[in-house]
Amino acid sequence: MTETLESPDRIAVRGLRARGRHGVFDFERREGQEFVVDVVLGVDTRPAARSDDVSDTVDYGELSDRLVAVVEGEPVNLIETLAERLADVCLASPRVVEARVTVHKPNAPIRHPFDDVTVTISRRRA
């Protein structure tokens, strides 16, 4: 008999930093800036807990490498688009059933004092 979960377990990577060239302004594309990414993944961690084997879970080091490659890669205008691409990377792992991705743009071109600009999206495996 297979157990069903009301809510999956969570694996999170928070504060992942990478330099990207995303934005609608030419200077953002030219100079680039730091982006910060948080991901929270819905994963059934029971197989990994039983086996004590990283191949039975999400390798967050490998995932972080793939996420940074997206941030450092092809520029997009909107952090909404960047967040969607990052969610696609998370959901490419067959163990991930859902992903919540937050992209922080702490140096967004705003003429007023502010702490942060973020976009958060949640996606589930179809």
Image (cartoon, grey):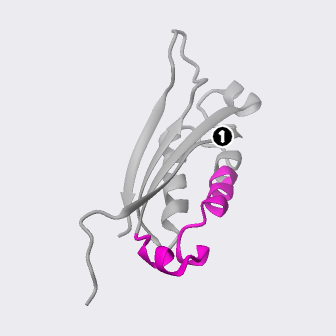
Image point (27%, 80%), residue name: 3
- Magenta stretch: give its range: 44-69
The type of residue carrying mark 1 is: Arg
Image point (40%, 71%), residue name: 44
Residue hosting label 1: 17
Outermost right residue: 31
Return the x and y of residue 21 as percentages of the image width and height.
Answer: 69, 37
Q: Image quadrant of residue 97?
A: bottom left
Determine whether 103 is above or below 107 in the image.
below
Return the x and y of residue 74 as percentages of the image width and height.
Answer: 68, 49
Residue 67 included in the magenta stretch of the image: yes
Q: Image quadrant of residue 14?
A: top right
Horizontal arrangement in the rendering, residue 72 relative to residue 3 (left or right): right
Location of the C terminus by quadrant is bottom left
Horizontal arrangement in the rendering, residue 60 relative to residue 26 (left or right): left
Residue 119 included in the magenta stretch of the image: no
Image point (53%, 81%), residue name: 51
Image point (75%, 31%), residue name: 30
Return the x and y of residue 11 as percentages of the image width and height.
Answer: 47, 58
Horizontal arrangement in the rendering, residue 6 relative to residue 40 (left or right): left
| Residue density around tag 1, few if under 14, some if 14–19, many if 20 or more, within 10 Å | some
